[in-house]
Image (tube, rainbow, N blue to C red):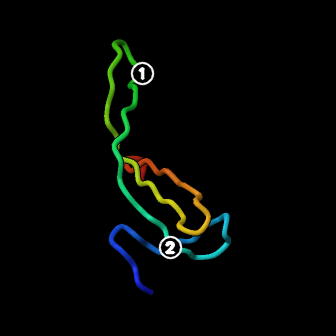
Amino acid sequence: MDTRPGQLFENCPTCERETAHSVSIELRQERIVGGRTKYAKEPYRVSVCDSCGETEHLRMNDR
């Protein structure tokens, strides 16, 4: 199995098998609910199936 940087083999629920995925980390701005309006940047793991395009976003700080 040849892979390129940022590519992993993971289970895809749409394809119902293990496929190559392009994986990256992105920072998303989120609003913090409270007295004053504040925003925080949170890291998300983004995984895109190279076969069907199914995309999964996972907030890293929830792990």
Nearer to us in this view, 33 or 51: 51
Percent coordinates x, y for residue 62 in the rendering: 42, 48
* Mark closer to the observer (2, 1): 2
Examine the rendered structure and indicate whether residue 44 appears above or below residue 29: below
- What type is the residue that disc 1 sits on? Val
What residue sits right under mark 2 in the picture?
20
Percent coordinates x, y for residue 29 in the rendering: 36, 33
Give the crowd class for mark 2: few <14, some 14-19, many >=20 residues within 10 Å. many
Q: Secondary structure at mark 1?
A: loop
Q: Secondary structure at mark 2?
A: strand
Give the crowd class for mark 1: few <14, some 14-19, many >=20 residues within 10 Å. few
Q: How many marks?
A: 2
Percent coordinates x, y for residue 22 in the rendering: 44, 64
Q: Which mark is residue 43?
A: none
Determine the image quadrant of residue 3.
bottom left
The residue furthest top is 35
Examine the rendered structure and indicate whether residue 48 appears above or below residue 33: below
Q: Is residue 20 left or right of residue 25?
A: right
